[in-house]
Image (cartoon, rainbow, N blue to C red):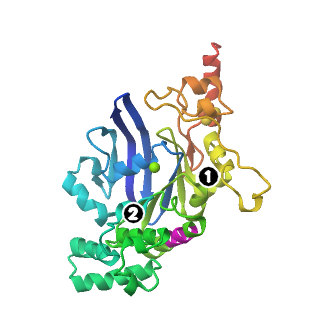
């Protein structure tokens, strides 16, 4: 499979009044052509910042990429100029955000907003653009697209607006679609429809999707692989089957316990993960989950766990999986 996107040891920080917040701390992953990779984590885990870095949208001057590479189709993105980045966005990388209203112009007809992409990026004539827009609106499930073409965003429901944003993202046939919490603002039935739409796009167009979400239920629906983020780091990564059936990190266990199972509704309570993530102004030197982890050992507080491989696709960073933990335990306890 072709490797479309590769992130290596990405570090992103933001200068604040209080100090420097280390939002992303050594993130590495890759995205292959035609696959959907979900990045999962609580808010503040660094998943959206990682996406912003890929899109060249880290707000300056406070934010900066301190270290690492982002390689898209053999091109290093972190060194591109503003202009080159703008060209990349929309044309090669399509974006879908949580609130569709932030991506739509409230004073412009929906159809014209999609037309613009065809006119600007593909040099289509107005007539060609309109034809393409209506076809695209139909393909994302907008009924009566000819009439809808001339309506304004406020005449659409939240779910329909998100379909429009997806249509805009698709207009240039991008190699990658980055979707940051695309269904979070929508009610459950509409969520399912949008996820079905993403899955349909993925199969039909063989696009790669980077899906950012806090919801493992969403992941099970659409993703091929998962990267679980916590406190600015990827703490576990694997195929959906590996993550759901053989999770290796206590944080992933906690996330899975907080997903409602359809057959358990009403019988089993969701168990939230107790506690809060660490302060990323001064991150802990050991495992970032130690303060909340029911399995924490002394070694966890003192030393950062390394990545352990369970298969070619499955890795986790936790001392429980490291045969050397015993040795460290002895060192930590002052033993031989
Ligand atoms: Fe828990 Fe230790 Fe594993 Fe961290 S390294 S998740 S504290 S057992
Ligand atoms: Mg976010």
Residue at 64%, 41% in the rendered image? 273
Does 188 sit left or right of 159 as displayed? Answer: right
In percent of width and height, residue 93 lies at 34, 62
As for residue 195 lying within the magenta part, the answer is: yes
Q: Secondary structure at mark 2?
A: helix
Residue furthest out toward the right = 267
Front residue of this view, candidates 35 and 12 = 12
Q: Residues within 10 Å of mark 2 (few under 14, many from 20)?
A: some
**Compared with residue 251, is residue 137 higher up or lower down, i.e. above or below?**
below
The region drawn magenta spans: 192-199
- Local secondary structure at mark 1: helix
Q: Nearer the viewer, residue 313 or 140?
A: 140
Q: Is residue 2 visible?
A: no
Q: Nearer the viewer, residue 95 or 154?
A: 154
Q: Is residue 262 visible?
A: yes
Q: Quadrant of the N terminus?
A: bottom left
Percent x, y of residue 62: 30, 37
Q: Is residue 334 above or below residue 52?
A: above
The quadrant holding residue 9 is top left
| Quarter of the figure with residue 177 | bottom left
322 within the magenta span: no
Q: Give the mark, 1 or 2, whose residue is nearer the N terminus.
A: 2
CA–CA distance in space, label 1 to label 2: 33 Å
Left or right: 268 as drawn, with respect to 158: right
- Percent from the top left, x then y, of residue 248? 64, 44
Label 1 crowd (10 A; few <14 / some 14-19 / many >=20)? many
Q: State whether residue 201 is above or below residue 143.
A: above
* Image quadrant containing the C terminus: top right
| Residue at image location 55% in from the left, 66% down from the top | 191
Mark 1 — residue?
A: 243
- Read off the residue under disc 2: 101
């Amino acid at each position: 499979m072709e490797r479309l996107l590769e992130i290596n040891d990405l570090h992103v920080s933001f200068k604040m009044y209080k100090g420097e917040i280390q939002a992303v701390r050594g993130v590495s992953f890759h995205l292959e052509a035609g696959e959907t990779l979900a990045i999962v984590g609580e808010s503040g885990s660094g998943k959206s910042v990682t996406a912003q870095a890929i899109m060249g949208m880290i707000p300056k001057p406070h934010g900066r990429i301190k270290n690492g590479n982002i390689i898209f189709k053999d091109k290093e993105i972190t060194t591109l100029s503003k202009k080159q980045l703008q060209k990349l966005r929309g044309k090669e990388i399509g974006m879908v955000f949580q609130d569709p209203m932030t991506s739509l112009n409230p004073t412009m007809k929906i159809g014209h907003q999609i037309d613009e992409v065809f006119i600007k990026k593909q040099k289509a004539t107005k007539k060609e653009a309109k034809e393409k827009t209506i076809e695209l609106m139909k393909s994302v499930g907008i009924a009566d697209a000819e009439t809808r073409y001339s309506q304004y965003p406020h005449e659409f429901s939240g779910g329909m607006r998100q379909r429009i944003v997806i249509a805009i993202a698709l207009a240039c046939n991008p190699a990658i679609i980055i979707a940051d919490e695309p269904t979070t603002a929508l009610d459950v039935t509409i969520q399912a429809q949008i996820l079905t739409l993403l899955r349909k796009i993925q199969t039909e167009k063989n696009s790669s999707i980077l899906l950012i979400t806090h919801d493992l239920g969403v992941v099970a629906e659409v993703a091929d692989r998962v990267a679980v983020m916590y406190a600015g780091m990827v703490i576990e990564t694997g195929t959906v089957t590996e993550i759901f059936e053989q999770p290796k990190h206590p944080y992933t266990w906690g996330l899975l316990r907080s997903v409602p199972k359809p057959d358990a509704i009403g019988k089993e309570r969701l168990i939230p993960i107790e506690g809060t993530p660490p302060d990323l102004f001064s991150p802990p030197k050991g495992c970032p989950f130690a303060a909340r982890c029911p399995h924490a050992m002394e070694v966890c507080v003192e030393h950062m766990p390394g990545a352990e491989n369970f298969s070619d696709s499955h890795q986790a960073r936790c001392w429980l999986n490291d045969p050397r933990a015993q040795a460290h335990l002895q060192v930590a306890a002052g033993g031989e």
